[in-house]
Amino acid sequence: MDTDKTIIIGSDHAAYGLKEKIKDLLFTLGFRVEDAGTDSEASVNYVEYGKKVAGAVSKGEYPRGILLCGTGLGMSYVANRFKGVRAALCSDVFSAQMSRQHNDANVLVLGGRIVGDVLAFELVKTWLNTGFEGGRHLDRIQSIDD
């Protein structure tokens, strides 16, 4: 697990309920959580919250972030526009593991209307507990950034 136990999280209205449950999980795991919003199920523009989380990770203010929207697609599009952000949309445990192991993903994206609570918790725990292998994978990441 990352030694820096801070994380930023954000969602739109479609995934607000799941975001709140994941925040509780993160607190239980000992994380300091910054909630970038939204704060209700009232309709909002997901882009605003994606920018807040991805921007903070891009600037190095947080080592990792979690984004949620209805499908996860919109948040993925937004987050991956930011320099240095490697956002991974995951809906299975193997993808969550590999996103960290081979791609050093620093933003986990989940679809609140796609994954249920139990799977979401497993995805988050797997993602947080999987380290980056480095080596040839680091070379590949650097070539993306170039």
Image (cartoon, rainbow, N blue to C red):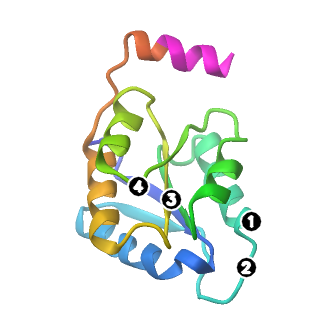
Quadrant of the image containing the C terminus: top right
Q: In which quarter of the image is residue 87?
A: top right
List the residue tagged with mark 2: 44
The residue drawn where x is 66% and y is 42% is: 80
Q: Earlier in the sequence, mark 3 or mark 4?
A: 3
Q: Residues within 10 Å of mark 1 (few under 14, many from 20)?
A: some
Dot 3 falls on a residue whose secondary structure is strand
Residue range in magenta is 139-146
* Label placed on residue 91: 4
Tag 1 secondary structure:
helix
From the image, tell me which residue sits under label 3.
Answer: 8
Which residue corresponds to the image point at 67% horizontal and 89% vertical from the top-left?
42
- State the separation of the CA atoms marked 3 and 4: 20 Å
Amino acid tagged 3: Ile
Q: Position of residue 14 (x, y in %)?
A: 58, 78
Residue type highlighted by circle 4: Ser
Q: Where residue 135 is drawn, which disc sits there?
A: none
Measured Cα–Cα span from mark 2 to mark 4? 23 Å
Q: Decide: is 101 above or below 4.
A: above
Q: Mark 1 points at which residue?
A: 48
- Residue 58 in the image: state x and y as whole percent: 63, 41
